Amino acid sequence: MSRDHTRRPLIDNLHDYNLDVSDEEDAFYAQDEGDYLIHPKWRTIITKTSNRIPRRLQRYFVIYALAAIVFFVSWRVYIGPQIAAYKKEQADMDLAAQMVPIKSVPPGFTDLIQVKDLESEHLPKGKGRLVVVGDVHGCRKELEKLLEKVGFEQGADHLVLTGDIVAKGPDSPGVVDLASKLGASCVRGNHEDKVLLAIQQSTDYHDPSIPRPDVEVVDRSTDEEAEVSSLGINDPTLLKLSKSFSKSQLAYLRSCPVILRVGKVGRLHNVAVVHAGLVPDVPLEDQDPFQVMNMRTIDLQTLLPSETRKYTMWEKYWNHQQKNKPEEERMTVIYGHDRKRGKNIKEFSMGLDSGCVSGGRLTAMVIEEDGKYDFSHVGCKGYV
């Protein structure tokens, strides 16, 4: 088979394109009319109009247009619903304010002090200050560091503890000893309450001839907050902790009231210290002691407090109510208990539990005679 040495030029293999148009002419880059998404007539109008607008203004227009789109989407998805929820909550609180709160009957425990007034000698005077510290939970070293940091002077300053000074941490008896040594005031927290109830159950009530008060032991094993059920009254860890205290240390814990009424301090409104919270418009003497030591939210439909997070945060409703009261009737609450919300400062409520025992911080609120206050804290090692 012979090889054909006669070959056609490669140019002859090309299709018959129109090669008369130079790539230097506009027609070379032109599109067919069918390729336009916008009709050529309108495209020409848009092009002529845009050419009259400076490029800087064109860029601003694009930026503003994108910003408007982002704002519109944000409003529909997040901002709008948030505003609607806020308005509804305000309306619910206004409606709840018209209700009459349910008064509770404090249990007749012989070792439970409902309300105690802070002695006038402990109020801040001159250079003397009131130092209020959040949940210590057995962290004695951190408490000592915090007092050193604020320059605490025994005899001039007065220490107030917001409860839960025991349990979880490494040295609960040591914290009680330090508080007693410094002459500190303390309110009864839910952990002090459990310790004292455990002591009662293991000693006072072993004799069947001694009448036992009706103590409600609630099973909270399914509660959303693990710490609520971290120490049950029959928990071996709690019983071991309870037995680690001396009689004098237990006596100090029993002397801590559920509510410490401080009174007016300078520009601060009537001050009260509790562990968890208070229900607005209920006299201190009529507050439910269990909820004062445990509450986190309040049901605006019933005005009943709850230790869960199902309802409106109690301090939100508290501040709403205080703003609507006459100046002389307003009250400021200093509390601890809610480490998840941490340091939570509002106009009429001061939350100081910043999670020391779990590796957070130990916080102090330092109050001067004129009511001015500042905050100080130290880092914590973390034990749970």
Image: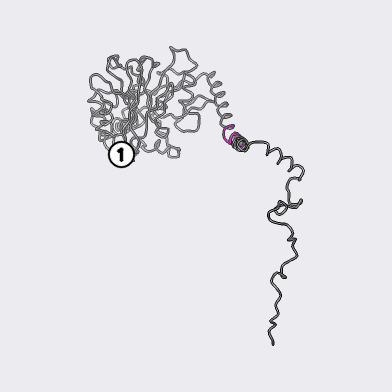
Q: Amino acid at mark 1?
A: Lys
The reply to whether the magenta stretch includes residue 75 is yes
Q: Residue 299 at x, y = what percent?
A: 51, 27
| Disc 1: which residue | 381
Q: Residue 219 at x, y = what percent?
A: 42, 37
Q: How is the image coloured?
A: one colour
Q: Secondary structure at mark 1?
A: loop
Q: Residue 338 at x, y = what percent?
A: 40, 31
The reply to whether the magenta stretch includes residue 64 is no
Q: Residue 368 at x, y = what percent?
A: 32, 18
The outermost residue toward the bottom is 1
Neighbourhood count class around disc 1 (C-alpha, 10 Å): few under 14, some 14–19, many 20 upward: some
| Quadrant of the image containing the N terminus | bottom right
Q: Is residue 252 above or below residue 172?
A: above
Image quadrant where residue 214 sits: top left
Of the pair 366 and 239, the residue shown nearer to us:
366
Q: Using the rendered image of the protein, determine whether residue 76 is visible from the camera's viewpoint.
A: no
Report the number of numbered marks.
Answer: 1
| Quadrant of the image containing the C terminus | top left
Q: Which residues are magenta?
A: 73-80
Of the pair 264 and 149, the residue shown nearer to us:
149
